[in-house]
Image (tube, grey):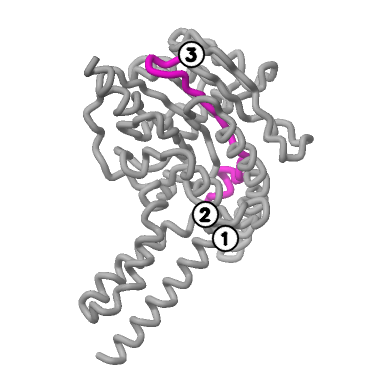
Amino acid sequence: MRKRRFILTWINRLLLLGTLVSGLGSLLPANIFAGASLLSLIFPTLIVPHFVLLLVTLRISKKRILPNLIGIALTLIPALAQFPFTKPKDQPQDCLRIATYNVRAFYQGLDAPEKMNTWAERENIDVLCLQEVRRPSHKPLEKSFSHVAFAPKISRYSVGIFSKYPIIHTEPLTFSYVEQGKRYPTRSAGLADIVLPWDTVRFINVHLNSTGVQDGDMEVAPSTEELLERGKQIARKLAGSDRTRGLQSKSILEWIEESPHPVVLCGDFNSVPGGNLYARLLLHLEDPYIFKGSGKMGSFEPLKRRYLPIRIDWTLHSEGIESYDQHIDHINLSDHYPLVTTIGPPIEEKATSEEE
């Protein structure tokens, strides 16, 4: 028994050390440490061995569970940012529904825009933030949304914000820290100030730099040697794209801090909720998915198909907004799935208006 306790103690200590290294590494700015996204992907999964070892340790020696409790506490938030565990709350009548959706330039089918418009009508989407919009193929969506803003304005390939409510100001945004010769990665963001029933809210829609990993890269290789080589290629692509996303992150934080209105930040971040940008965003914004996420997992179909149901599409909002639900709707109209969020006015403001 003494030998078991000794071995278990050191396994727990080494696991905690690995968790700390992974967590701290993922918090480094990606433009400085180009492997941060890999560590952000690994870090939340470490909650599983910590939980298993907690159960084992409880049976052998309850006094030795502290490393497991620390490990679970450290990995809990990024794990919850991937795992929906709640049911939608009762929603007041004055709530609105917003969605973020990478539409893959509508290449999933000739009638994809029509089907997306039908979906938006059925789901009562009030504000729709799209990435990888190919114009003028978007036209069917204008049947449901009378106000539209694109960034860049003159490009046929852009991000777009579609709204049923008036847009009083729009602005294409430039990732000024990214090398300007990269074109789309420098211009794949835009904002729109939308007059909602209770307040003017600034919607910021972003599409961060792609990982460069193609669907074919994830096919099973016929030999161990080729599998290892393919794994190295994927790791290099992920690490290489980190630097650009790290530079893009600096601009996003500035846009949020400079906003004169409450903010809703939507987009395809091409990374899991974790790491330096996510941690810094949580100082300003709330992620509804953590405690209000419901339904199915996985926002990127190629990974979900390979039993990696992770979320790379985010919607966060300021404290001046109340959220009631956030879920991923698994409709097959793109290689992504839309992330839908139900929002409303702050509870204090609502209570005051009801009293009046």
- Dividing the picture into quadrants, the one containing residue 131 is top right
Q: In this view, does 180 lie above or below 152?
A: below
Q: Dot 1, crowdedness within 10 Å: few (<14), some or many (≥20)?
A: some
Q: Tell me what residue is drawn at x 27 percent, y 76 percent.
A: 57
Q: Where is residue 216 in the image (x, y as percent from the top left)?
A: 57, 45
* Quadrant assignment for the C terminus: top left
Helix, strand or loop for disc 3: helix
Rendered image: mark on residue 288:
none
Give residue 306's position: percent from left, percent from top.
Answer: 44, 48
The mark closer to the camera, 3 or 2, is 3
N-terminal of the pair, mark 2 or mark 1, is 2
Q: Position of residue 2 (x, y in %)?
A: 28, 92
> Is 25 located above or below residue 259 in the figure?
below
Q: Which residue is drawn at 29% across and 74% down?
A: 65
Q: Which residue is drawn at 25% across and 70% down?
A: 55
Which residues make up the magenta segment?
Answer: 195-220
For label 1, the residue is 227
Q: What residue type is labelled 2?
A: Val
Q: Distance between the residues labelled 1 and 3?
A: 42 Å
Magenta residue check for 197 = yes
